[in-house]
Amino acid sequence: MAVRPTTEKRSSASAQSADKARTKTPRTTDNPQIADLSKDEEIQAYRDMLLIRRFEEKAGQMYGMGLIGGFCHLYIGQEAVVVGMQMCIREGEDQVITGYRDHGHMLACGMDAKGVMAELTGRRGGYSKGKGGSMHMFSREKQFFGGHGIVGAQVSLGTGLAFANKYRKNDRVSLTYFGDGAANQGQVYESFNMAELWKLPVVYIIENNRYAMGTAVSRASAQTDFSKRGVSFNIPGEQVDGMDVRAVKAAGERAVQWCREGKGPYILEMQTYRYRGHSMSDPAKYRSKDEVTRMRTEHDPIEQVRARLLERGWSSEDELKDIDKDVRAVVAEAAEFATYDPEPDVSELYTDILL
Amino acid sequence: MPIDILMPALSPTMEEGKLAKWVKKVGDTVKSGDVIAEIETDKATMEVEAVDEGTLSEILVAEGTEGVKVNTPIAKISGDGEAAVGGPKEGSAATASTPKSAAAPEQGEKPAVPDNTAKTVSGVPAQPVSEPLSDPDLPADVEYVSMTVREALRDAMAEEMRRDPTVFVMGEEVAEYQGAYKITQGLLQEFSADRVIDTPITEHGFAGLGVGAAFSGLRPIVEFMTFNFAMQAIDHIINSAAKTLYMSGGQMGCPIVFRGPNGAAARVGAQHSQDYAAWYSQIPGLKVVQPYSAADAKGLLKAAIRDPNPVVFLENEILYGQSFQVPKVDDLVLPIGKARIHRKGKDVTIVSFGIGMTYATKAADELAGMGIDAEIIDLRTIRPMDVPAIVASVKKTGRCVTVEEGFPQSGVGAEIVAQLMANAFDYLDAPVIRVTGKDVPMPYAANLEKLALPSVAEVIEAVKAVTYTA
Ligand SMILES: Cc1ncc(C[n+]2csc(CCOP(=O)(O)OP(=O)(O)O)c2C)c(N)n1
Ligand SMILES: [Mg+2]
């Protein structure tokens, strides 16, 4: 059932949770609105999140070995956001676009781990033939539009993808992801205005992981309840426990349906957390070890699913181990490929500049 | 004394029109605001309103006349008694009709332009040239200390902030994090959060805010985490900071420094690797500095902070950690606009700046081994460019190679080539060669990135070509 979340109602409810969020970890798991997932969905979510986790751990390791250069932004901790949202859309039809913290989004979109990892190492088998790197990958087949290095840029671009859907009169939806830091860029609000004015089918997913590099949300944002960022444009918004894949999926379904029905854009603030530093070179001294440990032990998105699967007897320890083994094999194969695939041919230097 | 009513211009481009109709007749009393006639062009019809008061005493151009030139008298109004000249309207002796057009007076007798500047044949005054200042003389017994570019930049800001309370730093992660590249290390602790300000990720907003603060007389140092992100703010750098002094007729200066790392780092891909030297160097109203050594970084940043104009100060991430000898003097301020001869030589002039100098210096060392004696000019400032220094050197060597990491088309090297064509053509013994970044977005793959950047080998090859060495 789709409830129309009026911005009015929303504001009082989310004001409370925003205050709580600052002192406590976000938690809406006991919210009755959150529908349970089926057994198959839980298992699928478990596998998809685990793939991202293991992939990112491996990427971190390969960065340490000098196989990956430049910037490398890991998604560990935020897996439930992208996996939950992906469960709400039609793969290869609805569009996905994000910033530079993009590995998880690509895997969730069904892009091949080998191609992603080989792009990280700058090899010819990478999604951009090695020419894009960690922050710049694309897949037309999977309707993944990048992969953008300029904070906030993807918000206008994602709005443009939605514009194209409306123009073509199809019912596709653009999932446009950006961070709490990006949410302060001016073009975000220019986009919000156009999206609502023209009723564009775009879900703005603000991944609030509480920090933009070393800057905590409260040090950069006058309004820390990001679900309200669309209020003056009349865009409905919700705060969501982004560590709980069920909550993400439930909210995602409402937002996607809203868009498909032609009602315009929708904002989802995903309250989440990144376990690692901003990028590989960030020692993350701006937050306590305690804070990180608490999130990992009490709110880990993968552990939550795992606990439910075991508790309900939907999976045995052994079955879960098998999933882990499968996932590790996929990642190992990707790493192997990305290590030995050759660099692009030097003739690629001058290709792909113009058509 | 009667007042002439002139044929008005409907637009700045109108030269003539038709006098379609007289609404007033001779002898009618005319009050200001009265419609006295209608005129037509091929584009529009317009009513002519009186500005002056009196009696329509004479009609000079008959109704229906075509091709009446703008500014020809079409009628006369005579005042009632002495009111004709004593009327309250300014300029009543000549223009009696509205609308007034900026172009109208020029159509008639052109007001004389005061001839106070040298003029070229075209009548455009010659661009004034100002001699760049020389570096200050250092005491003979000056001591040198080894310092990284990072420390030099930090010290320059700290010294200027101690000296002038209107100087403040703002940008992303400059305060609590101590700078994304640690250039503002320690500044928050010394100068407090009032003067070392962490901003949200809103480049367009905080650059504009900085420009506004500078208009009011503060001296902001706006740090961009890298100049790639200054593209979000380039409108304010150019439209607000660079042009306002001119647009305000010299009233509204903008003492601001935009600084941060510029150009390629290592393996950070196309959106994080661009060199903007040529871009900003095109803009009148900006100064553009791009230092190589720590001493220049320090002395020029201090000069930039004191400069009453907007200065774009382009640093380089790879140079931050490199050490140089810096003279130990109390107040090292170097002149913006002055190149530095980095190495004296007689066979060829290599002109470079910023990180380009790393290729130039290594190439010169290797060339020395081959018996080619290269002179290296470190531009230090891209705008205003020290063209005399380049020309003087090329007059001596007769050959020139430019080195930069930026793109080739309309690059800094292209400007140098044009300047040499104009100012040293007869002294050149070979065409100038530009060594630049390749004409491609920066690739991520390690092998391609290396090819996309200039190399020492390319500089050597270019020098061999201009010196006709096998
Ligand atoms: C326009 C622009 N400004 C600054 C940067 C440098 N930068 C890269 S990521 C980042 C922080 C963004 O934080 P947030 O939006 O919260 O996303 P998160 O990294 O937490 O996923 C900054 C400042 C950039 N890439 N682009
Ligand atoms: Mg964030």
Image (tube, rainbow, N blue to C red):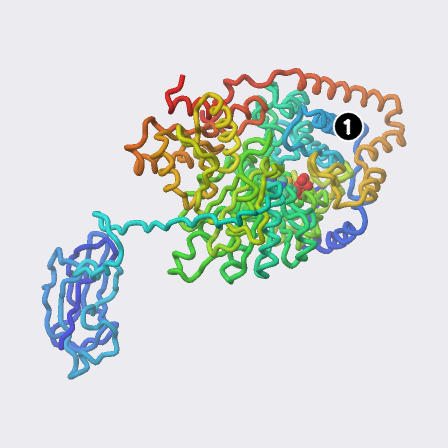
Residue A320 place in picture, x, y as percent? 84, 24
- Given the image, on which type of amino acid does mark 1 rest? Leu
Residue B77 place in picture, x, y as percent? 15, 74
Q: How many marks?
A: 1
Res A159 visible: no
B159 or B9, nearer to the observer: B159
Res B324 visible: yes
Within 10 Å of the Cα at label 1, are there few (<14), some (14-19), or many (20+) other Cα atoms? many
For ligand 2, the image quadrant comes to top right
Which quarter of the figure has residue B72? bottom left
Residue B277 place in picture, x, y as percent? 47, 40
Residue A238 place in picture, x, y as percent? 70, 47
Which quarter of the figure has residue B421? top left
> Element at badge 1?
helix
Q: Residue at x 86, y 27 (%)?
A: A314
Q: Is residue A189 left or right of residue B243?
A: right
Furthest residue in direction bottom, as rendered: B81
Q: Is residue A244 left or right of residue A260?
A: right
Residue on which disc 1 sits: A50
